[in-house]
Image (tube, rainbow, N blue to C red):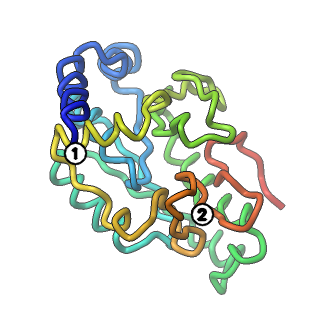
């Protein structure tokens, strides 16, 4: 770890009280805001930031039924470590799974439809009653995320993209400064971690999102797109 990285990590710590996320959680949307987290490769930073502001903020984790076991264990580890008091795992409805994907192979032929009933619909249920939610998307992921605003409106709710302007160096520095554990699959070459069938390792030259739906034109699961039914 370079002195520059360590110094930047200290800068982030010293300026936490100026974090606009604090005002959003404690004042503007107090008691009416949720954090949505995949507990993936870069998730620890945002979870830590929110926990330091208010560990009682509800955290929504969408358990699609096809999540890596490592992710589930990492979720439990971070929940205990950060003192998060309200982590909610939401799942697809059993009747939807029986109807849409009885043999569990829908991801092979209709990935968008699989994402819809496994991720989009469960999250929409979990967001009912909330006025705002916090996302961990970042501009450095590229594609449609390259021009991501810090704040936007989606489906009638305010969405706070609290990590929009964070780059890998900032994330590394923050994790080092706060001694946050990495997702166990990162060391094995996974840079962005979602469902097991649709996540692959990334080459050293590849971008962080290149391991998601590799070999297809799909780049998003749908939870950050308009809520539309997929035929």
Q: Give the number of callouts.
A: 2
The picture quadrant where one finds residue 1 is top left
Q: Give me the disc on residue 118.
A: 2
The picture quadrant where one finds residue 109 is bottom right
Residue that lies at the very extreme toward the bottom in this rendered image: 103
Is 94 left, or right, of 78 in this rendering?
Answer: right
- Secondary structure beneath dot 2 equals helix
Work out which quarter of the rendered image holds the C terminus and state it: bottom right
Q: Give me the disc on residue 85.
A: 1
Give the mark nearest the N terminus, 2 or 1: 1
How crowded pointer 2 is (Cα within 10 Å; few <14, some 14-19, many 20+) is rated as many
Q: Is residue 221 shown above or below 196?
A: above
Q: Nearer the viewer, residue 146 or 131?
A: 146
Q: Residue at x 56, y 43 (%)?
A: 141
Q: Residue at x 49, y 30 (%)?
A: 164
3D distance between C-alphas at marks 2 and 1: 25 Å
Residue that lies at the very extreme toward the right in this rendered image: 231
| Residue 116: x %, y % from top left | 68, 58
Q: Nearer the viewer, residue 151 or 157?
A: 151
Cβ–Cβ below 8 Å for labels 2 and 1?
A: no
């Amino acid at each position: 770890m370079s002195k520059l990285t360590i110094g930047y990590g200290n800068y982030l710590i010293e300026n936490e009280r100026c974090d606009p996320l604090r005002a959003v959680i404690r004042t503007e949307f107090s008691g009416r805001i949720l954090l949505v987290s995949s507990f993936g490769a870069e998730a620890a930073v945002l979870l830590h930031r929110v926990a330091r502001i208010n560990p009682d903020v509800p955290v929504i984790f969408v358990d699609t039924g096809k999540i890596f076991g490592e992710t589930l264990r990492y979720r439990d580890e971070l929940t205990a470590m950060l003192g998060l008091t309200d982590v909610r795992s939401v799942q697809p409805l059993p009747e939807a799974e029986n109807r849409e994907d009885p043999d569990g192979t829908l991801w092979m032929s209709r990935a968008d439809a699989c994402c819809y009933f496994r991720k989009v619909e469960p999250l929409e249920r979990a967001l009912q009653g909330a006025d705002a939610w916090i996302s961990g998307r970042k501009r450095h992921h590229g594609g449609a995320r390259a021009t991501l605003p810090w704040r936007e409106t989606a489906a009638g709710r305010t969405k706070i993209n609290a990590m929009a302007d964070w780059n890998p160096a900032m994330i590394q520095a923050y994790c080092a400064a706060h001694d946050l554990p990495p997702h166990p699959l990162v060391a094995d070459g996974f840079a962005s971690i979602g469902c097991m069938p649709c996540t692959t390792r990334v080459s050293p030259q590849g971008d962080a999102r290149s391991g998601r739906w590799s070999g297809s034109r799909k780049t998003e699961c749908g939870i950050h797109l308009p809520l539309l039914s997929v035929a």
